[in-house]
Amino acid sequence: MVIMIEDTHKDMTVSRQDFFELLKKTARIRQWKTGSPGYKKAAERLAGFWSALMTGNKRYRNNALQAHIKLDEWLQYWSDFVMAAYDEGDFPVKSCHRIAPVSYAWHTNFLEFLFELMDVSGDGVIDKSEFTNCFAEFSLSPEECGKAFDEMSKDGEIKKDEFAKLWYQYLTSTEESDPGNSLLGKLYTPAE
């Protein structure tokens, strides 16, 4: 699945458990022990993202007992997000009223979380080593990560504002060659 959330149970849904798996990977990347301050902060942030996603997802709100998002709902959610960004002509967009009110306010914090996840040194830039080590946790090869990083980086690093632009491009681009399409590893489309 896209957006760094893996369908850990391979049941074509995104669930709270998938966010917990992201927390475990985050802890490994950042070398945090369970219960450490960094781990606790990441756990709180991810729980907040999940809660915001659940309350902000228009399909979820129609079924208050649903504790997951089906793949088609997940993809529709992100599609609506992209369309809201196009409509607003701005990024990140905070809300959408195209079909039903949807809040995307959590997205700015999620983007910051992703940047901080990769910027292990905390120096405000992501270097090739940090990028490669991060995505090794997501089963991408070092060669693939290195190539993707080289396609995106300027002077061997990615600054926070550049990361935000690459993220926007990742979500909105229709051009396969756009650098943002490499942000979460090189995107591949299956052969027809």
Image: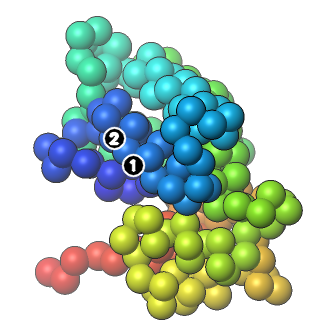
Q: Residue sitting at 14 percent across and 43 percent down?
A: 11
- Would you say 124 lies left or right of 6 here? right
Q: Which residue is mark 1?
A: 5
Identify residue type, mark 2.
Asp
Q: Which quarter shows the C terminus? A: bottom left
Q: Which residue is mark 2?
A: 18
Please report whichever mark, 1 or 2, sits nearer to the chain's N-terminal start: 1
- Would you say 16 lies left or right of 94 here? left
Q: Quadrant of residue 124?
A: bottom right
Q: Quadrant of residue 12?
A: top left
Q: Residue sitting at 47 percent across and 43 percent down?
A: 23
Pointers 1 and 2 in contact (CB under 8 A)?
Answer: yes
Residue 179, percent across and down? 60, 78
Per the model, the C-alpha gap separating discs 1 and 2 is 6 Å
Q: Residues within 10 Å of mark 1 (few under 14, many from 20)?
A: some
- Would you say 145 lies left or right of 114 here? left
> Does any portion of residue 156 appear in the rendered image?
yes
- Would you say 115 lies left or right of 42 here? right
Q: Residue sitting at 56 percent across and 77 percent down?
A: 132
Can you say whether 79 is above or below 178 in the image?
A: above
Q: How many marks?
A: 2
Q: Secondary structure at mark 1?
A: loop
Can you say whether 105 is above or below 149 in the image?
A: above
Outermost residue on the right side: it is 123
> Does any portion of residue 3 appear in the rendered image?
no
Q: Quadrant of residue 118?
A: bottom right
Who is closer to the viewer here, 22 or 109? 22
